[in-house]
Amino acid sequence: MQIISGTTDFLLQGASAVAIGKFDGMHRGHKALLSEILEAKKRGLQAVVFTFDPPPAVLFSGKAVKGLTTREEKRRLFRQIGIDVLIEFPLTFQTAAISPEDFLRVIVQEQIRAKLVAAGTDLSFGDRGLGDCKLLKARAEAYGYEVKIIDKVLEDGEEISSTRVRQAVEAGKMQEAARLLGAPYAVMGTVVHGRQLGRTLGFPTVNLMPPADKLLPPNGVYRSEVECSSGVFKGLTNVGVKPTVEHGDHPPMSVETYIYDFSEDIYDSFITVRLLTFERPEQKFADVEELKEQLQRDIAAGAR
């Protein structure tokens, strides 16, 4: 997959089918949109994703917003499903001020060479977000592209949105989040060395240190599954700051997982941890021995 990032000066080779959106979380609605451009590959078009970096909400609010998927997670997911080109268009106050007409003429027609444009019903682009599906359709013949507008996907009679997924994750409702996403909520990353306390206690674990812009569910213990190069394994994951052993005003957030029936050394390896169900809140214990006893109970319960 070709990644175009940090520049507005690009020109794709060959005709394209492009999906325009934010794609935070890669939920079922996003997947319906992406399926349109992947289907177009059968017609000889390259599948292109166009997204803004940072997202408009971050630029215009001036506040960092934690994402359901980090930039690296999105890249991996797009690569896995067969996207050919990912455009992370640099969004600044200057580039955001491009007229909707110029967005379609210069970026969509000339630079992306779009023959198919797929978008959701809430599409907005160009200066003050004045470009919309109506304008996209109105210019289709002039700029030589076909338009596919994808209706919202519903779950329990309500539309699936990144906001709805976010609310489920923030509440620790991992099964609801999985229904909306079409897959369990996941944290991806490279295994790092921790304090190795788990190994000392007889429960070796693997540690991820998620970036600050990754949305995590409430601190606590979760049943999970772990995917690494050798397969998929059952896990038990603690999301939080490990208050029994970590001290200071701002202990680091970590995602620490015990993997059942697993003995491989996977330090520095890339893994995916999928959080399946919330089991209990994170606790601070009186001492390490009390922590060990609770871990034994957690692991026994998770094995059932």
Image (tube, rainbow, N blue to C red):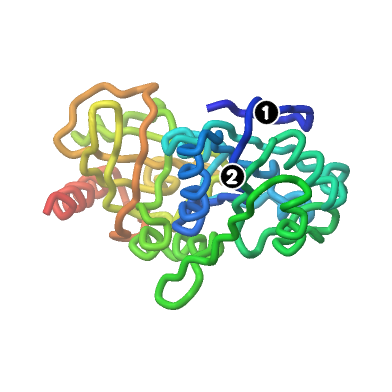
The spot of residue 84 in percent (x, y) is 53, 31
The spot of residue 210 in percent (x, y) is 49, 39
Left or right position of 20 against 228: right
Cα–Cα gap, marks 1 and 2: 30 Å
Q: Of residues 58 and 192, which is closer to you in this image?
A: 58
The spot of residue 122 in percent (x, y) is 65, 64
Q: Residue at x 63, y 28 (%)?
A: 14
Q: Is residue 244 above or below residue 280?
A: above
User: What is the crowding at mark 2: few (fewer than 14 residues within 10 Å), some, or many (at least 20)?
Assistant: some
Residue flagged by tag 2: what amino acid is it?
Answer: Asp
Disc number at residue 213?
2
User: What is the crowding at mark 1: few (fewer than 14 residues within 10 Å), some, or many (at least 20)?
Assistant: some
Which residue is label 1 attached to?
12
Say which quarter of the image contains residue 282: bottom left
Q: Residue at x 73, y 58 (%)?
A: 124
Q: Is residue 210 above or below residue 199?
A: below
The spot of residue 182 in percent (x, y) is 37, 56
Disc number at residue 144?
none
Tell me the SS state at disc 2.
loop
Q: Is residue 290 visible?
A: yes
Q: Residue at x 74, y 61 (%)?
A: 132
